[in-house]
Image: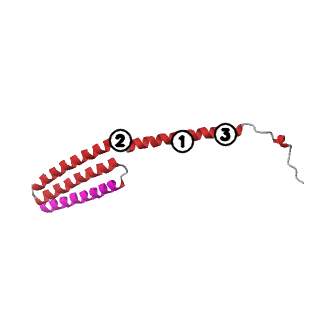
Amino acid sequence: MSVASLFDYAVMIALGSLCLSFLITIYRIVKGPTLPDRILGLDMLVAIAIGFIAVIGIKTGYALYVDVAIALGLVGFLATVAFARFVMSRGKTEEDILTEVRQAAADARREARTATKAASKAAARPGPAAGATGGEPRHD
């Protein structure tokens, strides 16, 4: 096996793994579930694109690809910072909303328990006696 063919196999393996990671990242961006997950996925796409550029630059031997990868890295970093500032300035995050929902569910469970206890106490209280209505019903 020559060095050139080993190099070609390594490039193909690198491109294949980058394609697989690209597809997994696209799935995470589409699936979510939260906005920070999607932002992290977009940042990962930038890193994968830089990997593609680096592998193609190594394969072709052009040094210009390194400059393109550096510029893409800077733009990707600025986009991630801008998205993070957007999420922080939005006010409530998904975690805050989940905390409120959990608190409301706990309050609802507490109220349901109180209502159940009140109903069981009402059922346990002695009501009118069975003989107070005049005894057994008549069957003629």
Instruction: Identify the amino acid type marked 2.
Output: Gly
Query: Where is mark 2, residue-wise?
Result: 91
SS at badge 2: loop
Query: Where is mark 1, residue-wise?
Result: 108
Query: Where is mark 3, residue-wise?
Result: 120
In primary-sequence order, the first of circles 2 and 3 is 2
Q: Residues within 10 Å of mark 3 (few under 14, many from 20)?
A: few
Quadrant (top left/top right/bottom left/bottom right) for the C terminus: bottom right
Q: CA gap, disc 2 to disc 1?
A: 26 Å
User: In the displayed structure, does residue 80 sit left or right of residue 123?
Assistant: left
Q: Residue 71, image x and y in percent?
A: 15, 50
Q: Nearer the viewer, mark 2 or mark 1?
A: 2
Question: Which scheme is used to colour this image of the protein?
Answer: secondary structure
Instruction: Identify the amino acid type marked 1.
Output: Ala
SS at badge 1: helix
Using the image, determine if residue 78 lies above or below residue 16: above
Return the residue nearer the eye: 90 or 5. 90
Q: Residue 87, image x and y in percent?
A: 31, 44
In primary-sequence order, the first of circles 2 and 1 is 2
**Residue placed at 64% from the left, 38% from the top?**
118
Q: Is residue 50 magenta?
A: no
Residue 88: quadrant of the picture: top left
Q: Is residue 21 magenta?
A: yes
Give the overall secondary structure of the magenta segment. Answer: helix
SS at badge 3: helix
Provide the residue span drawn in magenta. Answer: 3-30
Q: Residue 43, image x and y in percent?
A: 26, 50
Instruction: Identify the amino acid type marked 3.
Output: Ser
Return the residue nearer the eye: 16 or 88. 88
